[in-house]
Image (cartoon, rainbow, N blue to C red):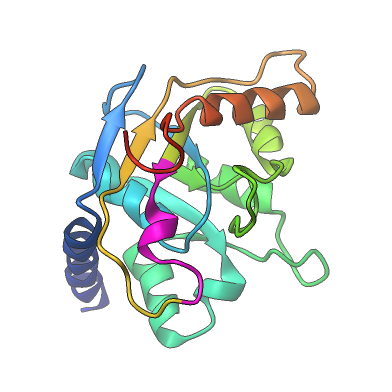
């Protein structure tokens, strides 16, 4: 019953996301074909992974799991149901003092089960005036741990304007999700060099006129 309900709720979320944002996926240097991937994206809204999930073809969507903070998605029954049952999120304890599992190991185990992942290397929502926050080291360590998996940069444009901070209701605006050319960590590449290269690959997908669609 819960699986059936999760499917109904997931479909409703997809319809709502498309209605509010008219989101479209743009594939640059990569095709939406079956294959295991780690999608890494900019992060300005709790709905970011929903838009990525929405534009993936169904055959890719079914095998793709977002990585998300357990503190947010376990805060209530509804959030827990949506995060765990609808999206099958890999829920990470972001507090080093309370976590009992290593986040990189959790993500690697999800990859080993055959899933693709959606990750946000900034680590938290970017509510500053900066285009990107500095990337956390987890993306590098995951890339080193599972070097056979492609890392795909994904730029989400305009979603922060759909749901501005402090607003209770979304503002209908067109959003885009742009997928870039995949990359992998080099055999002798340092953490700092890799993270800078990943940041550059992500920023290269940003629309020329700012955060809105081109």
Q: Is residue 115 visible?
A: no
Q: Is residue 39 inside the magenta stretch?
A: no
Rendered position, 32 above or below 122: above
Residue placed at 40% from the left, 66% from the top?
A: 163
Q: Is residue 55 visible?
A: yes
Location of residue 96 (image quadrant)? bottom right
Residue placed at 55% from the left, 24% from the top?
A: 201
Is 204 left or right of 214, judged from the image as shown?
right
98 or 209: nearer the viewer: 209
**Position in image of residue 166 (x %, y %):** 50, 76
**Position in image of residue 111 (x %, y %):** 50, 41
Location of residue 211 (image quadrant)? top left
Rendered position, 72 above or below 90: below
Q: Quadrant of the C terminus?
A: top left
Rendered position, 35 above or below 42: above
Q: Is residue 161 inside the magenta stretch?
A: yes
189 or 165: nearer the viewer: 165
Rendered position, 120 above or below 70: above
Residue placed at 61% from the left, 74% from the top?
A: 71
**Position in image of residue 43 (x %, y %):** 53, 51
Is 65 left or right of 198, judged from the image as shown?
left
Q: How many marks?
A: 0
4 or 27: nearer the viewer: 27
Location of residue 59 (image quadrant)? top left
**Position in image of residue 92 (x %, y %):** 61, 61
Q: Quadrant of the N terminus?
A: bottom left
Residue furthest to the front in view is 209
Is 201 left or right of 11, judged from the image as shown?
right
Residue placed at 21% from the left, 40% from the top?
A: 57
In magenta, the rendered stretch is 156-166
């Amino acid at each position: 019953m819960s699986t059936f309900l999760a499917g109904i709720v997931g479909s409703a979320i997809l319809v709502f996301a498309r209605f509010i944002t008219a989101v479209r996926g743009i594939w640059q240097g990569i095709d939406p074909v079956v294959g295991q991937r780690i999608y890494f994206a900019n992060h300005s809204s709790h709905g970011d992974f929903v838009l990525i999930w929405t534009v993936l073809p169904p055959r890719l969507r079914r095998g793709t799991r977002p990585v998300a903070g357990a503190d947010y998605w376990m805060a209530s029954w509804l959030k827990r149901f949506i995060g765990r049952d609808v999206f099958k999120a890999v829920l990470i304890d972001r507090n080093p003092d309370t976590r009992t599992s290593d986040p990189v190991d959790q993500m690697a185990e999800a990859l080993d089960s055959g899933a693709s992942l959606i990750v946000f290397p900034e680590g938290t929502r970017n509510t500053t005036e900066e285009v990107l926050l500095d990337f956390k080291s987890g993306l590098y360590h995951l890339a080193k741990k599972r070097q056979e998996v492609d890392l795909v940069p994904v730029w989400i444009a305009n979603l922060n304007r759909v749901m501005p901070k402090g607003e209770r209701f979304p503002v209908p605006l067109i959003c885009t999700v742009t997928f870039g050319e995949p990359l992998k960590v080099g055999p002798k590449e340092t953490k700092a060099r890799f993270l800078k290269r990943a940041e550059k690959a992500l920023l290269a997908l940003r629309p020329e006129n700012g955060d809105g669609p081109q």
